[in-house]
Every structure is written in C-alpha cells, then in structure tokens.
Amino acid sequence: MRSEVRLSGSECKPGTLLHAEKLPRELWPVGAADAFRIEYQGVDYLGRSRSVAGSVFVPEAGSAGATRPVLGWAHCTVGLNSNNAPSRVGLLPAEREHLSDWLRQGFVVAASDYEGLGTPEPHPYLNGEAIADDIVDIVRAVHQLDVSVDTRTVIGGFSQGGHGALYTAIMCTSYAPELDLRGTVSLAPPVRFIDFIALRTTKGDELVDALVPVVLAGLQVTHPEFAAERFLTDKGMRLLNLAATQSMGAVEEAAATTSNDDAGFTGLTERREVQLLLAYADLPVTRCDRPLFIGAGELDPILPAAQAAAFAGEMKTAGNDVTFHGYDGADHLELLKPAGLDASAWARALVDTASGDLRPAVGRDSGRDRRFRVLDATGDGHLSAGDFEALALRLVQRFGQAPGAPLARQIRAGYRALWRVLREQLDIDGDGTISLEEFLASSDVATSPEFDTTVESLARAVIALVEPDGQVLTREKFRALLAGCGVGENESGEILAELDTNRDGSLDVTEIVASIRDFCLGKNPEAPGYWLFGRA
C-alpha cells in the first residue's frame, strides 16, 4: 500500500495515486478483505488540476496469481460539501450491502467521492459530465495500489451515480483507452429530474422535499449566473445555504418544517430558467460502445420503473445493447438489494467474455440521406434537441475540454442555437422534432440571416479548439481539427479542397459557415460538412 508519501498533484496525470491509507473497519462492506481511503489526481469542472478522494474495497483473494476486474462505483446523493464524503463518513448502508454482491463476484470496487466531496469544494451536483472523469480516474488510481487487478472494467452507479455512470459510458473508452471497459450499470438514474421536481413543487402547502434545495444549490455551482434569490423567500435561500454547507440530515430537518409556499418553491419548474438548466442536466440519448444495464424500482419517485423502461427503450433504439430490470414493489433504496444480485452477475458474465465480442447493436438507418444519419446522433429516426446535445458532448470530449471551460460552454451554446434555428425553419408540423421528410424539404427553405449568424458563432468556437484566434484554419490546423473528429489525413485534404472556395489553402469563417449551411439546408446529400458533426 502506498501510504508512506503524499505526492504533489500539480504535475501528475489524471488518475495518479497521491495518497492511500487504511479505511476504518466500520466503513467496509461485508465481503471486503481490505479497504483504503485514497486521494488521486483529478480534473475539476473548469479543467483545473485538483485532488479527488474515494474508497477502495478489495474482496477475498481468488485463485493464486489471478487478477481481478474493477468496478468503478458512483454513489447516490449524499450532499454538496466535503462534510458528506463517503470515504469519511461511509456510503449509505443500502449501498454498502449492494457492493457486497460485487465483492462476492470478485470485483475490486473503486468508489469516488467526486470532486468537492472529501476534498475542497464546490461539488457540481447533477452534472454527470463533470463527475465522469472522477469515476474513471479512480479506476486508474487503483492500478497503482498493491492490489491484484487487471484492465477489465465495469462502471456502475446508483441515483446521482447512475446518472454519472451513463455519462461515463459515453466517454470512458476515448478518455481512458488503456482500460478494457466491458459495460455500465445504471440504477435509478434521474434522467428526467424535471418531472420529479415538478411533482414535488406543484402544491404550495406540501412540505419541501429536501432534494429540491439540493438540486437548486447544485445548479448554482455549474451555472453561477442562476440567481435563485430573485424568486425564493428568505426561508428558501436558507434551505439552499444549508444544502451547500451542511449534511443531508440538516437539510431534511429544515425541510420538514417548511412548505413550498414558505420557501418560494411552488411552481418551480414553470420558470423558464429552471426548465432550461434542468434540461441541460438530462443525459443525451446516444450510442455507447459497450452494453448497458438499467434498473429501477416500481415505486421509485425519482425514476419509476415504467419511466425507466421507456428511457431504456430510447437507448436501445439509439443502437445500444441494453438489459433492463424493473423491480416490483421497490422504491428508490429498496431496488439496491435485488439489483445487486442481477447487476453483478450480468457484469461478471461480461468480464468473463472476450472483449472483442462486446459490440452494441446498430442504430436505425434513418433513410438514405447521409446528412440526416449524421445529425441523428441518437439514432431514433428524427432530429431533436438531444441530438445536438450529444453532438456537442462528443466534440468537447474529443478535445479534452472540461465541461465548465469557457470554450466548452461556447460550443454547447452554438449547437443549441443551431438546433433552435433548424427547428424553427424545418419543423413543419410543429411537434418539436424534424423528420426525414421535413429535413429533405430543406432544399426549398431559404436561409436566414439568423441561421448564418448562429453558425458563425459555432464555427468560431470550433475553430478555437485548435486555433485560439478563432478566425482562420490553415491546412495543418484543419487537419488537426479533423483528426480530433476521427477523420484521416487523406480525407481531410479532400474536404479542405472542396471547402476552400477561394483556393488560398486555408479556411476562413465565411467558408466554414457556407459548408455547414450547405450540409444542413442544401440539396447535396454528399455535402462534406459532416466533419463538424461526426460520421453516420
């Protein structure tokens, strides 16, 4: 065990083990033969180096010389500050019991506290993209402990952690290609948290649900422009302050004597800014490159099994290999017990399978138009806001942009604005989506000044990924940009030759805007503007 020295994280790579010590015995799950509290090098929401803490549980030794797979575990909501770190106060008893099933299946369990819990705050609550690297980096750190593990990896999580686990499934193989990811388990993920918040804030005379101020306080971390004080009462702001600084128990105690009307929470989701921020927290339905296990309880108020089954169906339509389990009669915490047996056995079968056999099903072929298939990132046969969220997520991840970095924010804003202007021009029936037929009719739609202005903002942000001035892409910079998007050198040369209309050997913003306009609204199904969006 490396406990004799505390390393400086200033020059360490993400996932570097910084410190390890024995975890107090009372925090161990049943079935653990050893356990550690560790700190490891991470990256925060804004892209800065920081330390992250977590717990590692080691099962009884298997056969002599055998290595073991690793479960990267993501815990449920425990609070927003360092006083609530599971590596300090322990995971919830129901989670510890759940992890015992994984230990019995031979997994070494690496459970991140997440950034801002156990190490200096703040914690970006309900931002799955922000904690995804924490979940992966603790798995990397385990490989530097004196425990016998191999690269076979499964990601798992519950509630907030189930949400984070799904984000990890999207990015893990590109972020940490040295790990052999086999699959991801997501239990009770709050994929439509706005529905839960709406249900809990409809009636003014009902007592506050403690998760409501936690969610609002978390939104303020990742969206500092969110000014909740404009509509909350003094009691409501006190609850937000408790959520940011105290334990969940303290929040629950105060919420138990406060009504929604008292706090100013009534009708919360009718506010446009709340709707938008909660929508941004939604996981984009998109393809992952390894199988998924999704589980939910029938009586779970956060994600009822019926709603979870619908989400699992969307993920399957998008081309994922999905196993779904609904648990009759189980609420939020109660599903952990039966899911422990099912999920750990499912994962054990994956780690015992040759990795080359772990490929997802293909998504729906959305007609013959390549452009539509490229833009349909979710693979569900129509274009929607989720597609553009997924496209932005993939791009910023490819270039290692932290989710809260200014450039990542600009790129997301650009894709969101592009979706809005396309919907306004192409959504003929007004259902909030664009069908293949509506998209193919785009050649009859005249472009608007708003479209070009929107695309110009997005183009400048994308250029800045490789050229900070955001003005012109030289041949070398364009190749570097396309290489990050998975396009080879020969193909990038052909695309440049087609887009470089003034033949000066580079691309300026005007030429890039024209290429995206032609791709989205033109008549040519082979238009090369796909480089910005990926491949079908």
Image: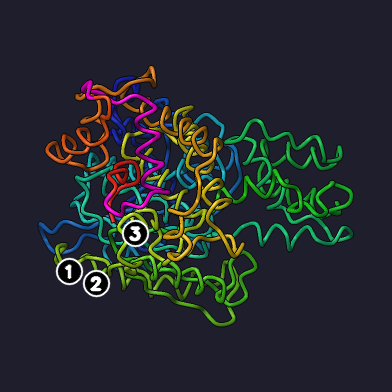
Disc with the residue nearer the chain's start (3 vs 2): 2
Could you classify mark 1 by the number of other residues whose Cα lies within 10 Å: few (under 14), some (14-19), or many (20 or more)?
A: few
Is disc 1 in contact with disc 2, using a CB cutoff of under 8 Å? Answer: yes
**Is 321 or 94 nearer to us in this picture?**
321
Report the residue at 73% width, 63% height from top: 199
Give the amino acid at mark 3.
Arg
Looking at the rendered image, the disc whose residue lies closer to the viewer, 3 or 2, is 3
- Observer-nearest of 461 and 240: 461
Quickly name the residue at label 1. 353
Q: Give the residues drawn in magenta, as a range.
A: 503-526
Q: Is residue 47 magenta?
A: no
Image spot of residue 45 (x, y percent): 47, 33
- The reply to whether discs 3 and 2 touch (Cβ–Cβ < 8 Å) is no
Who's the residue at 19% across and 24% down the image? 476
Q: Is residue 190 visible?
A: no
Tell me the mark number nearer the camera, choosing from 3 and 1.
Answer: 3
The residue pinned by badge 3 equals 373
For this view, does 95 lie left or right of residue 227? left
Instruction: Tell whether position 504 is magenta.
Output: yes
